Image (cartoon, rainbow, N blue to C red):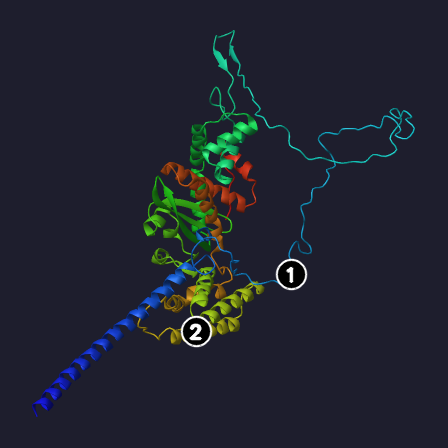
Amino acid sequence: MTKIFFCALFFLVTYENLIKRIDLLEAENKLLREENVRLLARIAELERRLNQNSSNSSKPPSADAFRKSTPKSLREKSGRVSGGQKGHVGSTLLQVENPDETLFHQVSECRNCQTPLAARTADELEKRQVFEIPDPKLVVVEHLCEKKICPECGSLNEASFPAGVENTVQYGPRIKGLMTYMQQYQLLPYERLSEFFKDIFGASISQGTLFNTNKTAYKNLSNFEEKTKELLINSPVLHGDETGLVVKGKLHWLHTVSSDRVTFYSIHAKRGREATDAAGILPHFEGTLVHDCWASYFSYNFRHALCNAHLLRELNGIIETDEHSWAKQMHALLIKANADTKVCEDGLSEEQIEKFVAAYKAIVSVGLNETGGVAPAERTRARNLLHRFVLRENQVLLFLKDPKVPFDNNQAERDIRMVKVKQKISGCFRSEEGASYFARIRGFISTAKKQGENILDALESVFHGQPFSSTA
């Protein structure tokens, strides 16, 4: 009996321990499953970040690492063969009617019988022309002003030097324009620019002279910049963007506000509204600004239009990493809407607009179902993008309703692209003055280029003290 009792007691104790062990194992298994879910999500997020590039996110092309695969373009195939199209005006080198110099090459004797032919008139002339540049050199113009004493009253009379001739020795407006052209347009650093003038013209131009030339251009463009601001403030549609750059070892921001005719740049230590207020354009603007959804822009009361090229890239990222049909549908819808608006020069009809809006809302509904409903448990990248489509519907589709509003913000991106090239070449700005000089002069160059001006001629006009007059 005692043996049976102890056996039963042992069984009960072992059973209780077994139950506890099972409970512990189940709890541990639950924790491991939860941790596995978190780790899988983390791995997916890290893979997504690793695969991000300029074609599927808002990252700029300059941030792309080397990739063997060809980047995915947002452009649709046109169906045309590559190369020049029918009606394309070529740029083939052609002979000119009045050459600068003509050299005659005579026939002195017959190659067959050696009969002298030097005195015989040519039966025919074959013409070939070679285009070349003369040896570049600086031309020194000396100005001599007379001084005469009046024989009657003894007064000293002096002739006046031309405007701009102020020093005993100086560089002229043309070469100063070339200095600025090579540095601010072709983006040569100071040292290489000094080498350029030494190698090409045999002129030893110091870096200090180059800096002072930029300083003069900056000063002479003060009124031009004020007029630029006025033109932009009164424009119906503007583009805005910003990019980081390093000034004296610290991160600053270059802001641009532009149109298809005028460009303005400013550099500030801040990225947000403090910087855009200091630029003095957006606080007074009442039109439509196209931008990439940077929050600071929404603090202004003007009309907003979002860059759909940015949205298409982000949709590409969702399509590549997540199995969401709404992203594919929205991508196709925006592409179709853009193509239709380009065909209709006077804008889409009300019926066409309503169809696109209805399709947009239907895709958003699909997205809400695929991403967890109106109030999801967690915010994912796909959900955040969808939330932007919900919250910013009017700004996303504004290009449908107003023909003046473009589909994307490519204008601002083009205007800001060369700033990144400048950084890659020079690294950073060594002074805040140099950064400010670059911003104002580069804005002038961009505006001149947009308005079809010859850049070197335009920069020469700056040093004459009469920059060309821009128009909206």
Query: Which quadrant of the figure has residue 5?
Result: bottom left
Q: Which residue is mark 1?
A: 80
In what element is the residue under mark 2?
helix
Instruction: Note whether 196 is above or below 282 in the view shown.
Output: above
The one of 195 and 23 positioned closer to us in this rendering = 23
Q: CA distance from mark 1 to mark 2?
A: 34 Å
Give yes or no for contact between labels 1 and 2 (Cβ–Cβ under 8 Å): no
Query: Which quadrant of the figure has residue 376?
Result: bottom left
Residue flagged by tag 2: what amino acid is it?
A: Lys
Residue flagged by tag 1: what amino acid is it?
A: Arg
The image's mark for residue 349 is none
Q: Could you tell whether 462 is left or right of 49 in the image? A: right
Provide residue 103's location: percent of width, then percent of height: 76, 28
The answer to whether residue 464 is seen in the rendering is no
Provide residue 461's location: percent of width, then percent of height: 52, 35
Query: Neighbour class for label 2 at 10 Å: few (<14), some, many (≥20)?
Result: some
In what element is the residue under mark 1?
loop
Name which of mark 1 and mark 2 comes first in the sequence. 1
Instruction: Note whether 229 is above or below 103 in the view shown.
Output: below
The image's mark for residue 361 is 2
Q: Nearer the viewer, mark 1 or mark 2?
A: 1
Q: Quadrant of the N terminus?
A: bottom left
The one of 275 and 235 positioned closer to us in this rendering = 275
